[in-house]
Amino acid sequence: AQKITQTQPGMFVQEKEAVTLDCTYDTSDQSYGLFWYKQPSSGEMIFLIYQGSYDEQNATEGRYSLNFQKARKSANLVISASQLGDSAMYFCAMREGYSSASKIIFGSGTRLSIRP
Amino acid sequence: DGGITQSPKYLFRKEGQNVTLSCEQNLNHDAMYWYRQDPGQGLRLIYYSQIVNDFQKGDIAEGYSVSREKKESFPLTVTSAQKNPTAFYLCASQTPGAGSQPQHFGDGTRLSIL
């Protein structure tokens, strides 16, 4: 069965520093996709970045990048130059297969707090 | 602006009462989803629907029911059979196609027991 593990329940980081949020996954499928979402205290889920299992390059979106290590089954999110507005819950998620009809499963999340 | 609207933002349920959470989208998405989130936890799938008049149970469907009579709407009913309904409920939708498509979420409904 597919599984997502986020081992850091909470993290504190100084403003302007880079931060890495860990995510490991377990799947027997060769084709899968990995997502990161941000959830501010208001509750909405904001899509940040996507990495496909066959993508050779690590995904990047502005200050967000994904450190994808396929052999280790890890997909860590890196936030460069953190800002106070980055304080939120962050969820790693995985979809098996290459169809949008496949379900997405979510990890338990990491609460990131940025110190001024 | 296109998006997903969930209402109400806060909802209180009395013992033995059924309550319905609304989810409407104007993104023209075929697929819609309901998730439950407990404090400090990730999202768990309750029900999902890929097309109108069809829906499937997710991982925690017991005590919940849904309908999908219109493409834009996917209401969730929390029945009296759901003994621990206090949670944050999120509705999502998605365009069909490649697996790289993310789900888009509403702002959620917070349900509590009176």
Image (cartoon, coloured by chain):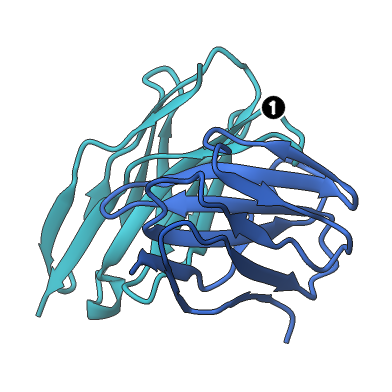
Chain colours: A cyan, B blue
Determine which quarter of the picture holds residue B2. Answer: bottom right
Determine which quarter of the picture holds residue B6. Answer: bottom right
Can I make out residue B44 in this image? yes
Q: Position of residue A64 (x, y in %)?
A: 41, 59
Viewport quadrant of the C terminus of chain B: bottom left
Residue at the (87%, 63%) spot, across then down: B71
Which residue is identified by label 1? A97
Q: Position of residue B97 (x, y in %)?
A: 83, 46
The answer for which chain carries disc 1 is A
Q: Position of residue B77 (x, y in %)?
A: 62, 57
Nearer to the camera, A47 or B10: B10
**Tag 1, which secondary structure?**
loop
Q: In this picture, is B47 found above or below A86? A: above
How busy is the neighbourhood of tag 1: few (under 14 within 10 Å), some, or many (20 plus)? some
Viewport quadrant of the N terminus of chain B: bottom right
Task: Name the amino acid, label 1.
Answer: Gly
Q: How many numbered marks, from 0 up? A: 1
Residue at the (14%, 55%) spot, across then down: A11
Nearer to the camera, B102 or B11: B11
Nearer to the camera, B10 or A87: B10
Q: Position of residue A7 (x, y in %)?
A: 22, 36
Residue extending farthest to the top is A28
Tell me if B22 is positioned left or right of B16 in this view.
right
Tell me if B32 is positioned left or right of B109 in this view.
right
Residue extending farthest to the bottom is B1
